[in-house]
Image (cartoon, rainbow, N blue to C red):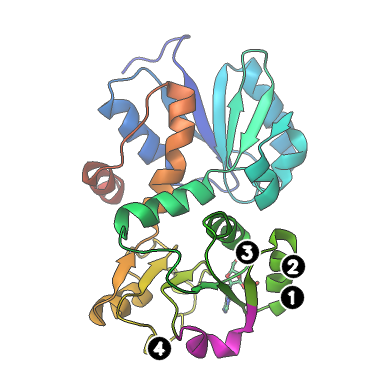
Amino acid sequence: MTLTSHTPLAGVMGWPISHSLSPRVHSYWLKENGLDGAYVPLPVSPDNLEHALRALPKLGFRGVNLTVPHKERALSFLDYVSDVAARIGAVNTVFVSQDGALSGTNTDAFGFLENLRRNAPQWNEARGPVVVLGAGGAARAVVAALLDLDVVEIRLLNRTKEKADALAESLGGPINIIDWSEREDALDGSTLLLNTTTLGMVGQPRLELSLAALTKMAVVYDLVYAPLETELLSTARSLGLSTVDGLGMLFYQAAPGFEGWFGVQPVVTDGLRDSVLSTP
Ligand code: ATR
């Protein structure tokens, strides 16, 4: 496709940015929908974040996604921040308005829930406690989403307990902090297990966890998607449990940005998944 001065532009700012899968996702949707548009990786160092954001309207960008390490710091450089982004304390999607103002929101909670609903439609928030492993940025979005669903109980476990305490205090709600060493007992009676830690990711330590205490109807959801089939998910599958992988969350969190920038609601399909997984 030939790019012109009218081509709608969006991208993703991160540091480093070369590993981001977002350009593959948005490029696939642009092509699939026959749209004029481009989505580019933007390597922006932390020192340059404010200037880079402020340059977006001048460069004709419709907006950007933000990834590590910019999601939290960007809050202070934007003109408007949505309630959900303020609550989570991080922005992952920025829209440039006609007058050049910058609005930030967070679509991670939406992406997390949409992926759960599509891939484990039988799961019901009223049935029992949810176990969340981790208390980093991803956990904040996940816990905020679960609280909005009015789940009966969130059992939150993190290696560094103080971070779990801080997360619970800032988000409020029915959160029980449990020691990391108690993680196998914490599974007892829970209907959903969520891994938001980096354990099990390529190059990171294993997540050591027996799933014996989970009931047969439990869903196991791993936010890690490299590898796609983590040890946690393969263990869950071998026990006959339903599983949800992290790639779908990446797709669903991307959809609101795409719609805002390019004007078409994109669809998450097997074709998208195959394309993202097969692109070298
Ligand atoms: P993200 O933004 O993806 O959530 P993060 O904020 O760096 O990333 O959070 C990483 C999570 O993985 C944290 O919950 C971290 O636990 P700590 O708060 O104790 O650091 C967890 N994590 C990373 N390595 C871990 C390990 N070896 N054992 C247990 N938890 C680990």
Q: Amino acid at mark 3?
A: Gly
Q: Is residue 136 something one can see in this rendering?
A: yes
Q: Give the residue at the far top of this rendering.
A: 5
Please say if the residues under marks 3 and 1 sit with CB atoms less than 8 Å apart.
no
Q: Residues within 10 Å of mark 3 (few under 14, many from 20)?
A: some
Q: The magenta stretch spans which residues? A: 177-188
Residue 213, numbered circle: 4
Disc 2 from disc 4: Cα separation: 27 Å
Q: Position of residue 211 (x, y in %)?
A: 38, 85
Q: Residues within 10 Å of mark 4 (few under 14, many from 20)?
A: few
Does any atom of ligand 1 lie closer than 8 Å to the CB of label 3? Answer: yes
Going from the N terminus, do you reach mark 4 or mark 1 first? 1
Mark in the foreground, 2 or 4: 4
Residue bearing the label numbered 3: 136
Please give the name of the residue rendered at 33% of the width and 19% of the height, measured from the top-left corner. 35
Q: Amino acid at mark 1?
A: Glu
Closer-to-camera residue (23/107): 107
Q: Secondary structure at mark 4?
A: loop
Task: Give the position of the N terminus as an image quadrant.
Answer: top left
Q: Is residue 42 something one can see in this rendering?
A: no
Q: Position of residue 130 (x, y in %)?
A: 49, 72
Disc 3 from disc 2: Cα separation: 10 Å
Residue bearing the label numbered 1: 162
Please say if the residues under marks 3 and 2 sit with CB atoms less than 8 Å apart.
no
Residue bearing the label numbered 2: 166
Verify whether residue 187 appears in magenta.
yes
